[in-house]
Amino acid sequence: MKNNYRRVNITLTDEEKKQLLEEIIYYFETERDENLGIIGSESILDFFMDTLGVTIYNRALDDAKLWLSKRMEENEADYYALYK
């Protein structure tokens, strides 16, 4: 099967990656009653970074743009409120 996923250039610190891997391992142990090692958890992390990374990244950018647009509208209103 061909991999059609686009890799997002997101860099995780060693601590962030370690925490995510621990959470993946914990999830599989508690929710699925499966023992998952480091290689398996890294594979799953890579899979989700490839499949969800672009979507989540773009959604975050859209949210930031919307937030900034609202702040700019408020600034413009404040600016014109200063007129006498």
Image: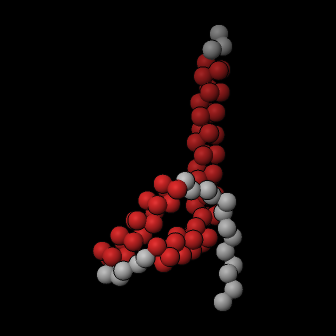
| Residue drawn at (64%, 45%) of the image | 65
Q: Nearer the viewer, residue 39 or 68?
A: 39
Task: Give the image location of residue 11, x and y in percent.
Answer: 61, 56
Q: Quadrant of residue 27?
A: bottom left
Query: Quick check: 11 above or below 23?
Result: above
Q: Quadrant of residue 54?
A: bottom right
Q: Nearer the viewer, residue 42 or 83?
A: 42
Query: Quick check: 70 above or below 3?
Result: above
| Residue drawn at (67%, 74%) of the image | 5
Query: Quick check: 69 above or below 42?
Result: above
Task: Give the image location of residue 30, x and y in percent.
Answer: 30, 74
Specify the quadrant that holds the C terminus.
top right
How is colour applied across the structure in the image? secondary structure
Q: How many numbered marks, from 0 up?
A: 0
Task: Give the image location of residue 60, x and y in percent.
Answer: 58, 53
Give the left or right position of residue 47, taking residue 28 as reference: right
Q: Quadrant of residue 49?
A: bottom right
| Residue drawn at (69%, 79%) of the image | 4
**Would residue 49 be visible to someone looking at this image?**
yes
Q: Nearer the viewer, residue 27 or 38?
A: 38
Residue positioned most to the top: 84
| Residue drawn at (42%, 69%) of the image | 24
Task: Give the image location of residue 53, x and y in percent.
Answer: 60, 64
Specify the quadrant that holds the N terminus.
bottom right
**Would residue 44 be visible to someone looking at this image?**
no
Query: Quick check: 28 above or below 22?
Result: below
